[in-house]
Image (spheres, helix red, strand yellow):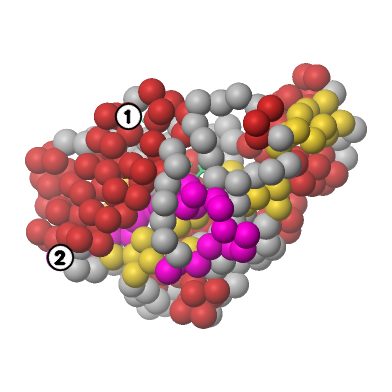
Amino acid sequence: MKILVLGSQGMLGRNLVNRLPGFAHASFPSLEVIAANHAQLDIAQGPNTSRFIAQTTPDIIVNCAAFTNVDACETHISDAFAVNATGAKHVALAGKETGVKIIHISTDYVFDGAKNQSYVETDHPNPISIYGKSKLSGEIAIQEVCEKYAILRTAWLYGQYKKNFVTTMLDLGKKNGSVSVVTDQIGSPTYTTDLSYAIWNVISKDLQGIYHVANTGTCSRYEWARKIFELTGNKVSVHPVKTRDYKRAATVPQNSSLNCSKYTTASGHTMRPWQEALGDYLGTTL
Ligand SMILES: NC(=O)c1ccc[n+]([C@@H]2O[C@H](COP(=O)([O-])OP(=O)(O)OC[C@H]3O[C@@H](n4cnc5c(N)ncnc54)[C@H](OP(=O)(O)O)[C@@H]3O)[C@@H](O)[C@H]2O)c1
């Protein structure tokens, strides 16, 4: 089996490329992973995307490529749509032409955050940011074009290969001895290593459709920050603030926590609790 990973230099893409060979088991003894970074393939370029995919002849494409800077999307609207919407469509069309299944990575930010429970796959998306709108357009393109696809919505990613909320908290805590963090954004922190395993699980079980995949449990960003300092033993004061006190370009959902029951039932795999995954990440990498 040949798996092509797009966006292979990103936080998730790099983790996935590194982990996939280790996940292979007896059913897939000849697993081959092809990593394509932004310089090798710009998915915003339709003909190049078709040509690249036709030449590499994958069995599965995992699309981790995206314009992910949520605030920058607000001022770079056409760039955000060129990658997250049109780029996803180019991948979908190339997949259709070659009969390849697409695993497309999407986001909790397709929801508006007004629900007071975790979101399930059948909840109506209603994005409130350019990033969320562009990612939802990508999801729609995948569904309209692809015959074989899985869309995995995930959330609040952190991992070894890029600065993220966890590293930012640690850096700010070290520098200032205190951090101010919002209490009114609720979500599902997710370790890219755990998501990489789930992606493999979706591939090996041949799951189709939309799935929410995140570490189990939910918290506010404030609770997440407190747990980071508790687990690292750093004496850092964490001050609670409200989203309205923290100016940023994008409006983000208040509650974007994901209910992953559909994935758990279909795959037979339960994502571990977010606190456990965070402890693993902090213990093994920092
Ligand atoms: N990070 C999160 O908290 C989060 C939460 C929910 C969902 N997600 C989703 O998870 C997926 C992976 O996110 P991530 O955190 O790993 O993002 P990331 O670190 O920003 O990686 C995205 C990768 O896509 C590449 N890329 C950008 N434009 C491209 C283009 N036109 N053609 C090909 N590659 C392009 C980037 O390359 P350059 O850097 O060279 O441009 C980068 O290597 C994305 O679909 C994202 O929407 C992320």
Q: Which residues are magenta?
A: 99-122
Few, some or many residues within 10 Å of mark 2 (<14, 14–19, 20+): some
Which residue is labeled 1 in the image?
77
| Disc 2, SS | loop
Camera-near label (2 vs 1) is: 1
104 w.r.t. 233: above or below: below
In the rendered structure, the answer to whether residue 68 lies left or right of residue 281 reads left
- Quarter of the view holding residue 131: top left
Drawn side of residue 2 relative to residue 47, left or right: right
Q: Which residue is mark 2?
A: 99
The one nearer the camera, 37 or 89, is: 89
> Can residue 153 be seen in this snapshot?
yes
Marks 2 and 1, the one that precedes in the sequence: 1
User: Percent from the top left, x then y, of residue 88?
Assistant: 26, 48
Q: Residue at x 33, y 42 (%)?
A: 134
> Outermost residue, top direction?
175
Q: Quadrant of residue 21?
A: bottom left
Under mark 2, the amino acid is: Gly
Could you say which quadrant of the image residue 226 lies in? Answer: top right
Name the residue at 58% across, 32% down: 163
Q: Nearer the viewer, residue 56 or 135?
A: 135
Q: In the image, what residue type sits under mark 1? A: Ile
Name the image quarter holding the N terminus: bottom left
Percent x, y of residue 53: 17, 50
Q: Residue drawn at (75%, 33%), measured in percent from left and top?
A: 241
